[in-house]
Amino acid sequence: MKTPIAGGGEQSITDRLRSLIKIPTGSPLILGIGDDCAIYRPRGSADDLLFTTDLFIEGVHFLRDTHKAGDVARKALARSLSDIAAMGGAPRFCLVSLCVPRWANRRWVDTFFDTLIARAAETGAVLAGGDLSQGETLACDVTICGAVPRATALRRDGARAGHEIYVSGMLGGSALGLEVRKGKAWRRHLNPEPRLDLGVCLREKLRATAAIDLSDGLSLDLRRVCLASGVAAHISPPPRFPGATLEHALHGGEEYELLFTVRPHTRVPAMFQGLPLTRIGSIVEGPAGEILFDGQPLEPLGFDHFKTSK
Amino acid sequence: MKTPIAGGGEQSITDRLRSLIKIPTGSPLILGIGDDCAIYRPRGSADDLLFTTDLFIEGVHFLRDTHKAGDVARKALARSLSDIAAMGGAPRFCLVSLCVPRWANRRWVDTFFDTLIARAAETGAVLAGGDLSQGETLACDVTICGAVPRATALRRDGARAGHEIYVSGMLGGSALGLEVRKGKAWRRHLNPEPRLDLGVCLREKLRATAAIDLSDGLSLDLRRVCLASGVAAHISPPPRFPGATLEHALHGGEEYELLFTVRPHTRVPAMFQGLPLTRIGSIVEGPAGEILFDGQPLEPLGFDHFKTSK
């Protein structure tokens, strides 16, 4: 289903946008394009607000045959919630735009919203608005606002040489699920769990120096942290979901686990709410973005929507 | 291009959502679904933040043949900016999600973003993030955050019997443009001007009691104000764009002019920055949402995406 855009990948488009956009001095916008969320500091507020938005489109991100209305709602929401988790935020509200094709009847729409509203409410997010349209293809865009105490958001750019790299959970399950389409791996692909409580713990307790959610694959997402921080990394094999290959675990997307870095000698518990936290390597000095896996360069093979070749 | 959804219109879906969603007591979300924007009050902040999001989809809201990349960017942005204007806000930042089909090459994408970034910056909004995806149909979703001093946002629900009803500009030009596809009317359809300065003036100077932007037609949008405020209205013919029929002016959508109400005897200038402000009627006691036009009931014939019959 991939139709590459001539002339450059998603990364190249966002890199160009970052170079074009100048945030004016004194702007309440603290951080723009280039992290999991934008950060906005309201005048006089004790909180910084985090904003993220994610598309979820039939034929690109999911198939009508395999994803029921509730599945679409849960996963569309999970994608954005996971970005809030990666920055240590608490969800506050969401906006949902939905484009509805002919095949989705009123019952589909009602189930979609019932599931979304219920799931969002569990995380503290209220559905505050959105837009509805008819259209050819089912598409939804979920924007979430989260909050953190002022100047405490976890970012991608704080990793320094000597910091230790961890991941939550067992990787590769979502990619495996997409192949086998059954069992625990498929359920994991269908219904990922955004790590909101862990994100808050990383921010408040472990004082993580950088974090990102694994949406496009470990190899690509760790590279993003290293590029933003101007550092390199050495890693060893990450913990694998039962049945997943090393390839699944290194490059498979849609994990929605958190990758984070902490200062040396930080006491990271082996488990958090039943979820393993595993050290997989260290941040080192070196060419920004370079990752060595068991001593060999690791290519970023994760998912880029507009890449011309993979 | 209209493909109705079985079982109810857009209004019926949003009415259902409003009845389902309970904003918890003490929530920083002051206003949810049902106005031009949601209102969020950050902890300790001097400002309230306004949020709105609007879809703009090929084949539904525009045609590829008639809208170039820059036109799509300008109009997609104008739709959301107009919601911020209607509540008296100053734009702060935007998030843009873009689904790119095969026919739109990299140059298209670059022109789209160049236009959007430049136009947004003129209004004070910085492009702070978004999402990119490939897909079958070009679709974009623009979320805008605006700010107003705490508790001063213009809303739909403040109109009371005796208040006077005004509109900005000359109505019907966008609907006429869609028919004739040439001249000033077509340019008006293609490139509407969100009334941001007027919105601020309504809030600060004229202390408008209610406001809405005319996106779906005067008859439908005035009815929304009346329903939200629990009142009725009497109106006379509104000022017409040259060449537009009364039908265009009463029911034509995509005007992006502002309709507002003020207390009796408010001194409303005849012009604001070259834009006429015209009194078209009065708010009266009566069945909520009822509108009499020259003494006869006016049906709300404006645009509803999911209406089963028109």
Image (tube, coloured by chain):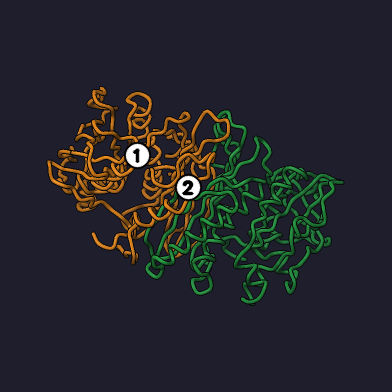
Chain colours: A orange, B green
Left or right: B256 with respect to B93?
A: right
Left or right: B92 with respect to A79?
A: right
The answer to which quarter of the image holds residue A293 is top left
Quadrant (top left/top right/bottom left/bottom right) for the C terminus of chain A: bottom left
Residue A72 to residue B108: above or below = above
Residue B200 to residue B279: above or below = above
Spot occupied by residue B278 in the image (x, y as percentages of width and height) = 80, 58
The kind of residue on which mark 1 rests is Arg
Left or right: B205 with respect to B139?
A: right
The answer to which quarter of the image holds residue A154 is top left
In this rendered view, identify the residue nearer to me: B37 or B219: B37
Which element carries disc 2, helix, strand or loop?
strand
Mark identifier at residue B60: none
Q: Residue at x 64, y 56 (%)?
A: B194
Mark identifier at residue A156: 1
The kind of residue on which mark 2 rests is Ala
| Pointer 1 chain | A
Q: Residue at x 21, y 34 (%)?
A: A282
Spot occupied by residue B134 in the image (x, y as percentages of width and height) = 37, 61
Mark 2 vs mark 1, CA separation in Å = 16 Å
In this rendered view, identify the residue nearer to me: B192 or B246: B192
Label 2, residues with CA under 10 Å away: few <14, some 14-19, many ≥20: many
| Pointer 2 chain | B
In this rendered view, identify the residue nearer to me: A7 or B209: A7
Q: Which residue is denoted by mark 2 in the rendering? A: B128
Q: Confirm whether circles 2 and 1 share one chain.
A: no
